[in-house]
Every structure is written in C-alpha cells, then in structure tokens.
Image (tube, coloured by chain):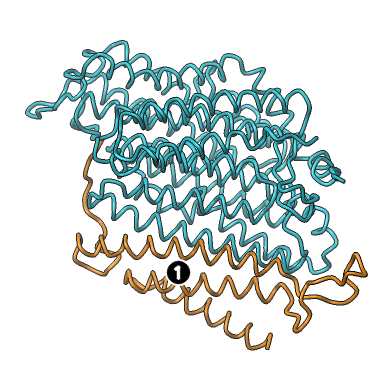
Amino acid sequence: MIDNHILAPIFVQLFTAILQLMFWRKTLTQRYLSVGGSLIGLMVAFRLFGRVQESGILTLNSANWDAPFGIVFVADTLSVTLVLLTSIACFAVSIFSSVGLSRQRMLYGYFPIFHFLIMGLHGAFLTGDIFNLYVYFEVIIISSFVLMTLGGRKAQLEGAVKYMAMNILASMFFLTGIGILYGITGSLNMADLALKIQEVQNKTLVGITSCFFIIGFGIKSAVFPLYYWLPSSYHTPPSAVAATFGGLLTKVGIYAMLRVFSLIFIPDDFIRTLLMVIAVLTIVTGALGALIKTNIRRLFSYLIVCHIGFMVGGIAMFSKVALMGAVFYLIHDIMVKTNMFLIAGLIRQLGGTMDMNKLGGLYRDYPKISLLIALVLFSLVGIPPLSGFWPKIFLFQEAFTQEQYFYAAALILGSFVTLYVIANMWAQVFWKNPPEGTTTENLFAPMPPYRKILMVLPIGLMAVATLYIGLNAEAIVKIADVISTQLIDPTAYIEAVLGNKTD
Amino acid sequence: MELLLVLILGLLYAAGVYLILRRSMVKLLLGIILWGNGANILIFVLGKITKGSPPVIDDAYRVFQDVYADPIPQALILTAIVISFGLTSFAIVLLKRVYALVDSDDLDDLNTPEEEDI
C-alpha cells in the first residue's frame, strides 16, 4: 500500500535542521526549535506507527518509479518501531541538551547537526534500497563526526580520529559489498535482491559478499574484533552527544544486520557459526572490559559492547523465538542506553566528576533523583518485572533449544557482570561517603529551578518509557512477534514492495 | 581494458590496506582515499563495461534492442565520489587539528589520559 506519510519523520527533522540554520548563533531560538521539532517528529512517528499497525506494510516509490528501478521507502513494523524509539530518544536528548551543553558548542551548530543525524537514522530505518541505506549511513557518520569533534578539546579530537578512521573503513567495506552485489544481481532494491540472489549460481561469491556486509555492519555495531574504537571514543564528547551515539548509532548496525541477513543473505551454517562466535566473544570481552573501568562513561561504553553481543547471538540463532528476543532486546536497549548516558551527564553535574573513586554520597544529598536512576539501573540489569528481563527469556529458551551452550553461558556471564558492575557503581557513587580530601564541585545546586527540571525531566521521560516496556511487556512481545514473523518469512515485505505497480 | 581496470583496482585496494595499517596519520588518510577510489572503480567494472552503446532508446521502440551501457554504476560512483570528497575534506581538517594539538604524526601518541567534560 502506497502512503506518503512514510517520509514525514525524515522531513520533520530535515526542516527543523534547516530552520535552525537560519537562526545561526541564536541559541535560545534554536533550543525552542529543537524541542518543538522533536515533539512534532515524535507525534508524526506515533501516527506512522499507528498506520502501519492498522494497514500492514506501507511503501513509497520515490518520483513514481516502479519498484525495482526507483528508490523505495518501506515502512514495516521493524522500521516504524525503530523510528518511534528514535523519536522518543531524540525528544529526550533535545530537552537534555538545551541545558546540558555549553553555549560555545551550541554556537557552532550543535542543534542543526543533531537533527541531521536523527534524519539520517530515520532514513536508514525507512529505506528499502541498499545503496540508499549506504547514503543514509554516510549522513549519519558525517553528522556524528561533527558532533564528536564539536568543542575541540584534545581528548575529544583524539577519540574522533579513531572513530572516524574505523567508520570510514566500515563504509568502504559496505560500499565494496554493494558493488559486488550489484555486479552479481544487477539490482539495488532489497526486496528485488532477495529474489535475484537465489538465482545466482556462484554461491561462493554470495558468501564472500555477505562477509563484506558482516565486517561493515560489525564495525558499526561494535562487535568483538572490531569494537575497539567505541570505548576509546564514546567517553569524550558531551553527555547529550554520547547519549545519542550510545543509544542509537550502534543499533543502526544491528538493524542493518537484521534487515540484510533476513532478506538477502539468509544465514547458512557458516554465517550462523561465525555470528555466534562473534556474539559470545563480544559478550565476554565487553563484560571483562566493564569490570575494570572506574570512569562511569567508559564503564557504560563496555556495557554497550557487551549487550550488542546478546542481539548478535539472537540473529545468529535465526529462528522466530531468537529474533523475538533480539528485537525485544533492541527495543529495550535503545531506551536504556540513551538514558544511561544522560544519567552519566547528570551525575557529572551533581558530583563534578565521572570517576567513581572520587564520587560518593549522592543518595544522601539527592534521594529522589537517586531512586529514579536506580529504576533505570534495575531495568538495565534486568530485574524481573523490568524491561531487561523479558528478552532474555526468549534468548535463553532458544539457546537451549538449539543447544548453543556457549552462548547461554555467555548470556549468564554477561548478565552477572552487568549486575556486579552496576551494583558496584551504585555503592560507590550513591551509597559510600564522599572520599576524604577531595573537593567536588556541585554544578547542579546553583542552577535555577527550571534548568534543574529540564535536566531531570528527560531522564524521567525515558524511565517512564522503560517502565512501560517492562510492565506492559505483553504489548511489546506482540510487536516483537509481528516483527520476527516478518523477518523469518519476508514474502509479505517482498510483495508489498514489488506488487505495487503504479500506472 | 577491463583487465587493466581490474589490475588497477587490485593495486588501489592493496595500497590502501597497506597504508591504513601504518602508524602515521597522513598515511592513514592516503590509504582511505586510495581505498575509496578502488571501491569506485570496482563498482564501475562490475557494472559490465560496454563501449559505444549509450542507453538511449530509438523513437520507434519501447525497450532496448541491443546491449547497452548500464548507467546506474556511474550514478552510484558519482554519489560515492561526492560523499568520499566530503569525508576526506573533514578528515584532513581533523587530522591537521590533531597534529597541531598533539604535535605528532604517530597514531600511537593519541592516548591522552582521561579528561572530563559535561
């Protein structure tokens, strides 16, 4: 079914960004525009989500070119769910950045670039054309380069060099893969590719091409041998930026993997084993890295890596239940990881540092905020009624059905280490008395009340969203069920894209 | 002609990988540029090079009667060139700034101990 609403989330972000460029150096106007634009984007995303729930997969042939020839935008349940989650995260982060950023950064165009980044994310989720996906990936990385370097401190630039080199490398792998794919099939439309790739005689070449995609998306989503850029760069930018990156950017890699490996390269035994080995090693190395870090944001960076492994494992098992687990975890992870970095920013405001050894006594001074943060931390760890718990049931169940005991062990290890480091962080930051002899500068207390509210509000919003995911898990399971059904059997997707002949 | 292009693209990829694996920032940059050009030629070659038959249809027909040059790879390359131009120019400025701050061309020197910000 053709529907022009698909492009609305992209356009809202695009026009917000353009409008903000017209108010260059007027940071107050930009802040209002940013929050307003994000709110409109959120409403549009809700509407698109509702439409897809009502009438199934929507498509849009740009410039009215028939499906395999022109660029197609496709909104299936996976896409719109991710667009909705991105919009929620975008709304929270834009509120947080209106008070959490220094004015210098806003003067050099933080807000327009932020909205271009969100536009790229929406585009990557909604496009049905593999080269268009590459283009949106480039929109995302060039915006993220600017956000990462904005401010120009030494540590930030050093992190940016690593981040930039690895991400350009990932794009090159991705582009090479697309080139070979076009060479062997003569198509770029993902639905069309799904049909044409089955007719290719040379299966070895198809296997090699899929390896290019694994490496390209693997660098983006930070899996085991390719993740080193992430912990060495994510602790450098301001927390608002780190929240966008940590919550959303690695997840685009996971989304692309889900899409490409369910539609084009159906995983064979070799790919499954490869992905499973990657997943187990990612969980183990991420967990070990998290154990030794004392800086809160470095700790969270390693937790991102660790939890990416959970989702890659779900893709590796490639069955309905496993994909349900992976998709549910993806939904939970976007909400929680974004919030974790916002919390890191808040802790830095409260205690003046992010080093756990120098912090302390926050529970004594701010019991209400601490309880709010505790709620999010519990969700991350996966205490039963909260959101991190439900996807793990599916993943465990499928790991035992398919007798992937290494993965099951890694899941247990990853969950326990997460519990341990979060408990340790809670004890150090909130419960213990501030260490003797260190003078912490509290930047939060002297703020006017409206700034305090604007700083805590987005964390509260995201915490409510996380609570909703956890306590209303049945609704989320239903959505994950629809998504995994569509991923396992892509005929509905292919029919929706190719069956749309406009005369 | 195709053989020549294949050799060139192999050379570009090899040189790109070699340069990226070095420790110098400038060599990293050159490696990325070479690799990007290699990828562009790869797309070009895989689009099956056809000489002297532009993709233009005669008035009398509705579909192609003969083999024709595929225009899509060229459109893809054009997009990829523009994108890599943008990325490269950003990378040059970034590396220049880093060089000014760190005063070293060695990637192993990029390890300032933790510094904090909001």
Residue A30 in the image: x percent, y percent?
Answer: 36, 32
Q: Image quarter for residue A47?
A: top right
| Residue labelled with disc 1 | B32
Q: Image quarter for residue A102?
A: top left
Q: Secondary structure at mark 1?
A: helix
Residue A446 in the image: x percent, y percent?
Answer: 16, 19
**The colour assigned to chain A within the rendered structure:** cyan
Which chain does the numbered disc 1 sit on?
B
Q: Residue at x 64, y 41 (%)?
A: A126
Position of A422 relative to A372 (above/below): below
Task: Give the chain coloured orange.
Answer: B
Q: Residue furthest right?
A: B60
Residue A134 in the image: x percent, y percent?
Answer: 59, 55
Q: Pick the residue in front: A334 or A498.
A: A498
Q: Residue at x 46, y 65 (%)?
A: B85
**Is residue B26 found left or right of A334 in the rendered image?**
left
Q: Residue at x 56, y 57 (%)?
A: A216
Position of A50 relative to A232 (above/below): above
Q: Pick the residue in front: A66 or A127.
A: A66
Q: Is residue B26 visible in the rendered structure shown here?
A: yes
Q: Is residue A312 visible in the rendered structure shown here?
A: no
Q: Pick the residue in front: A215 or A452.
A: A452
Position of A72 relative to A106 (above/below): below
Q: Residue type at mark 1?
A: Ile
